[in-house]
């Protein structure tokens, strides 16, 4: 009888080509219009990551 949880030998850790692995999650609340605009993007998660990173970099540059 097969193991219902899968075969641990087949499990492999996720790999990434990023400098830092994406290990944390972030949840935000937005209005309906913003939600629809972001969801209409080809890759909404990457769009949000880039927007947040750009804003953080801009603020860091302004403070120095």
Image (tube, grey):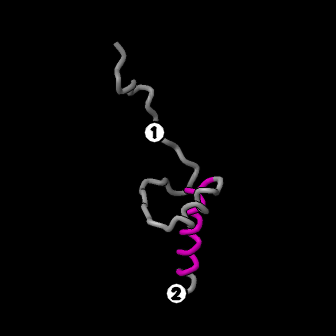
Disc 1 or 2, which lies upstream in sequence? Answer: 1
Magenta region, residue range: 43-59
Front residue of 46 and 7: 46
> Which quarter of the rendered picture does the C terminus lie within?
bottom right
| SS majority, magenta | helix
Quadrant housing residue 2 = top left
Per the model, the C-alpha gap separating discs 1 and 2 is 39 Å
**Which quadrant, please, contains the N terminus?**
top left
Badge 2: few (under 14), some or many (20 or more) residues near its Cα, within 10 Å? few
Q: Taking 59 as reference, is 22 above or below it?
A: above
Read off the residue under disc 1.
13
Front one among 24 and 44: 44
Q: Is residue 18 magenta?
A: no
Residue 54 magenta-drawn? Answer: yes
Would you name the residue on which mark 2 appears? Answer: 63
Which residue is painted at 58% across and 68% down in the image? Answer: 51
From the viewer's side, name the closer residue of 31 and 62. 31
Residue placed farthest to the top in the image? 1
Residue 63, given in percent of the width and then of the height, sits at 52, 87
Relative side of 41 to 32, left or right: right
Quarter of the figure with residue 19: bottom right
Instruction: Assess whether mark 2 and mark 1 are in contact (beta carbons under 8 angstroms).
Output: no
Residue 40 spot, x, y in % from top left? 63, 56
The residue under the point 43% across, 31% down is 11
Image side of residue 60 versus residue 41, left or right: left
């Amino acid at each position: 009888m097969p193991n219902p949880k899968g075969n641990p030998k087949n499990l492999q850790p996720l790999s990434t080509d990023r400098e830092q692995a994406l290990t944390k999650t972030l949840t935000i609340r937005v209005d309906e219009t913003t939600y629809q605009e972001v969801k209409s993007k080809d890759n909404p998660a990457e769009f949000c990551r880039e927007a947040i990173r750009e804003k953080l970099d801009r603020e860091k540059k302004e403070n120095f």
